Image (cartoon, rainbow, N blue to C red):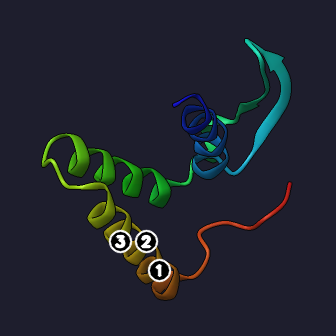
C-alpha cells in the first residue's frame, strides 16, 4: 500500500503539471506551478476517478479505457506539452 501511494504522490504532480519549483516542503522536494496544469491529463484523471468511485468500474477495464483514451488523444492532437524546463 505504501509503495503504491508513494508512486501516486510522486507521479501525480509530474503528470498533471508541466513545471515544478524546486523547493523542500513537508518532505517533498518540489512544488507544482499551478499555472502549468495539463488540462487533458487533469480531465482524463477526473474521468478515471469518477469511473472507479462513482460507476464502480473495475481496475483492468479502467486501465484499458484510460490508456486507449490517452493514445487516441495523443494521435489526435499530439503531445500536449513539451518535455523539459
Q: Residue 77 at x, y = what percent?
A: 51, 82
Instruction: Name the residue beneath numbered marker 2.
Output: 67
Name the residue furthest bottom. Answer: 75
Q: Are marks 2 and 1 in contact (CB under 8 Å)?
A: yes
Disc 1 crowd rating (10 Å Cα; few below 14, some 14-19, many 20+) is few
Instruction: Name the residue beneath numbered marker 1.
Output: 71
The number of numbered badges drawn on the structure is 3
At mark 1, the secondary structure is: helix
Q: Residue at x 58, y 43 (%)?
A: 12
At mark 2, the secondary structure is: helix
At mark 3, the secondary structure is: helix
Considering only vertical position in the picture, is 71 above or below 50? below
Q: Are marks 1 and 3 in contact (CB under 8 Å)?
A: no
Instruction: Name the residue beneath numbered marker 3.
Output: 64
Q: Residue at x 78, y 65 (%)?
A: 83
Q: Residue at x 34, y 47 (%)?
A: 46
Considering only vertical position in the picture, is 16 above or below 60? above
Considering only vertical position in the picture, is 28 above or below 38? above
Q: CA distance from mark 2 to mark 1?
A: 6 Å
Left/right placement of residue 2 relative to residue 41 reads right
Q: Residue 44 at x, y = what percent?
A: 39, 58
Q: Are marks 2 and 3 in contact (CB under 8 Å)?
A: yes
Name the residue furthest top. Answer: 26
Q: Residue 66 at x, y = what percent?
A: 37, 66
Considering only vertical position in the picture, is 73 above or below 3? below
Quadrant occupied by the C terminus: bottom right
Depth check, mark 1 against mark 3: the one in front is 3
Q: Residue at x 46, y 60 (%)?
A: 40
Amino acid at each position: 500500500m505504501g509503495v503504491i501511494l508513494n508512486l501516486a504522490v510522486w507521479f501525480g504532480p509530474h503528470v498533471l503539471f508541466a513545471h515544478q519549483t524546486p523547493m523542500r516542503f513537508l518532505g517533498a522536494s518540489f512544488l507544482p506551478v499551478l499555472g502549468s496544469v495539463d488540462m487533458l491529463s487533469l480531465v482524463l484523471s477526473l474521468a478515471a476517478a469518477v469511473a472507479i468511485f462513482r460507476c464502480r468500474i473495475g481496475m483492468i477495464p479502467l486501465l484499458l479505457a484510460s490508456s486507449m483514451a490517452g493514445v487516441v488523444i495523443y494521435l489526435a492532437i499530439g503531445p500536449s506539452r513539451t518535455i523539459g524546463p
